[in-house]
Amino acid sequence: MPAALNYFDFYGLPESFRPNEAALKRLYYAKSRETHPDFHATSSSENQAEMLRQATLNTDAYRTLSDPDQRMAYLLRQHGLLEEGKQEQLPPDFLMDMMDLNEQLMELEMAPDAAAQANVAAEVQALADTLDAGIEPVLAGYEQLPADHRPAALQQIRTYYLKKRYLLRIQQQLATFAARS
């Protein structure tokens, strides 16, 4: 079985964390028209099967590349920087901050307090906003980087992605507390 086709190659787009969304959508619709089963109903069963495979690839590629989080995870996996089921290391200072937040969450679970919950939520949102602001220039500039600078940028993006996922889990816990009260 051949290696899976890179989604960016599939659309003829440069690898990017910020692809041209209008171009991506145009390419998706063009490929959808090319591979639609109705246009291949009278062709050989092999061709029909290939068109179905291409249509599925088109849908998977578009869903992945049109969602910023899925696109980021996809690119990191493409470069071997995200392995499912593998414990990822985060910087110790970030982990200490998260330990403090988790302690505050445990306290909230034991003794719900709307004001304390709002403070934790604000703290988490501020951390998320700072993370987003810090990584945006790296994401926006990635496509223009020389090949030898991309590995360092990808490491920064990987760390951002892992931190962001951690913060999202905390935000989900806060939302669960909010729903209970």
Image (tube, rainbow, N blue to C red):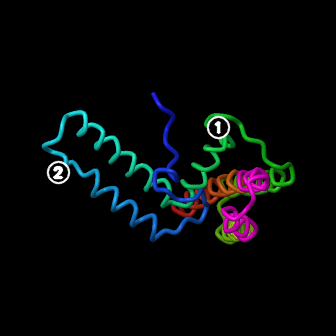
Closest to the camera, between mark 1 and mark 2, is 2
Foreground residue, 127 or 178? Answer: 127
Q: Identify the image quadrant of residue 105.
A: bottom right
Residue pictured at 28% horizontal, 50% vertical: 35
Q: Is 5 located above or below residue 15 in the figure? A: above
Q: Residues within 10 Å of mark 2 (few under 14, many from 20)?
A: few
* Residue kind at label 2, given as amino acid type: Asp
Residue pictured at 13% horizontal, 43% vertical: 42
Foreground residue, 125 or 109? Answer: 125
Measured as percent of width and height from the top left, residue 112 is found at 65, 61
Q: Residues within 10 Å of mark 1 (few under 14, many from 20)?
A: few
Q: Which residue is mark 2?
A: 38
| Start-end of magenta stretch | 132-158
Q: Residue furthest top?
A: 1
Measured as percent of width and height from the top left, residue 4 is found at 49, 38
Foreground residue, 134 or 98? Answer: 134
| Quarter of the image that includes the C terminus | bottom right
Main structural element of the magenta stretch: helix, strand or loop?
helix
Point out which mark residue 170 bears.
none
Assign a secondary structure to mark 2.
helix
Compare marks 1 and 2 and give the one earlier in the sequence.
2
Q: Is 26 located above or below residue 63 in the figure? A: below
Measured as percent of width and height from the top left, residue 150 is found at 74, 54
Assign a secondary structure to mark 1.
loop
* Residue kind at label 1, given as amino acid type: Glu
**153 lies left or right of 29:** right
Q: Which residue is mark 1?
A: 83
Residue pictured at 57% horizontal, 59% vertical: 14
